[in-house]
Image (cartoon, helix red, strand yellow):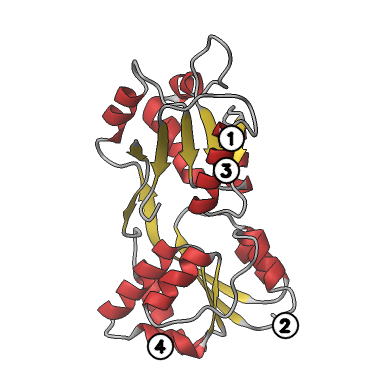
Amino acid sequence: MELPTIALVAPRSWRPVDDAIERLDSYDWVVFTSANGVESFCARLKRHRKDPRALRKARLAAIGPATARALRAHGLRADVVPEEFRAEGLLTALKGERWRSKRVLLARAAAAREVLPRELRRRGARVDVVPVYETVVPAGSKQRARALFGRHKPDAITFTSSSTVRNFFALLGRRQARRALAPPAAGLAGAAVATIGPVTSRTARALGLRVAVEAKPYTVPALVRALEKYFRGEGPQRHPSTSLGTRGPLG
């Protein structure tokens, strides 16, 4: 069962993106932290009558394989894709670079962790952070969420980002969300919480949830494999019937 907890909308202002596009040739690096960021930025490039290949003058970094695939779909190749698909992994992959006075364009969601730009600036880079989309709670999801957690509750719920966790709580309310996701135990209803990686797990735990499954690597296919292992008994015993995926666009 699917429960969309994220919808993408345009940023409050396109001005920072448009200004960056006008001086695209000045950047040494362009960093993308999601496939959504790639799609939104390339769409804005076309609005300026620029081909995505205008990015080829800079070195490109993608935070994971899905982001790298999105770049390839536009005829671009990522110069760096970290082994660990989060900001810390990308920083590790880039540690051998000389960043003093390098100009970096970071295209991302409006609400995002500050780990990447903060560390690149500490290393001496000049970083422009431009929001290319915002995430909001989808209309209609609140009613669907309450229906799904009515009489028949899922055995597992997957979270593919910190935003999906926070928005799930926004949909159900803190008390009902915690009750719905109480750890499965004998005689008690509850859903096994499965996350796509440690950042999402940290958000879930901060909101009072116990994480039963965490994917490694931090991808949707790995999350599916981790759930399979969990329900085969390589973890707390549970007999599955249904699982609920909270998600945003592109998974």
Label 1 sits on what residue type? Tyr
Are dots 3 and 1 in contact, CB under 8 Å? yes
Q: Earlier in the sequence, mark 2 or mark 1?
A: 2
Image disc number at residue 226: 3
Rounded to the nearest angstrom, the CA distance separating label 3 from label 4 is 39 Å
Helix, strand or loop for disc 4:
helix
Instruction: Report which residue position mark 4 lands on.
Output: 54
Residue type pointed to by label 2: Arg
In terms of sequence position, does the residue under pointer 4 or pointer 2 come before the other?
4
Separation (CA) of disc 1 from disc 4: 45 Å
Structural distance between the alpha carbons of marks 3 and 1: 6 Å
Where residue 67 sits: x, y (%)?
47, 67
Quadrant in which the N terminus is drawn: top left
- Are the two marked residues, 2 and 1, in contact with CB atoms closer than 8 angstroms? no
Task: In this rendered view, identify the residue nearer to me: 36 or 99.
Answer: 36
Q: Which residue is mark 1?
A: 230
Label 2 environment density (alpha carbons within 10 Å; few <14, some 14–19, many ≥20): few
Q: CA distance from mark 2 to mark 1?
A: 43 Å
Q: CA distance from mark 4 to mark 2?
A: 23 Å
Front residue of 126/223: it is 223
Q: Is residue 22 above or below residue 36?
A: below
Q: Are marks 3 and 4 in contact (CB under 8 Å)?
A: no
Percent of width and height locating residue 242: 40, 30
Tag of residue 98: 2
Residue 219 seen from this side: yes
Q: Report the side of 171 relative to 93 (left or right).
A: left
Quick check: can you spot residue 23? no
C-beta proximity under 8 Å, tags 2 and 3: no
Q: Label 4 sits on what residue type?
A: Ala
Q: Residues within 10 Å of mark 1 (few under 14, many from 20)?
A: many
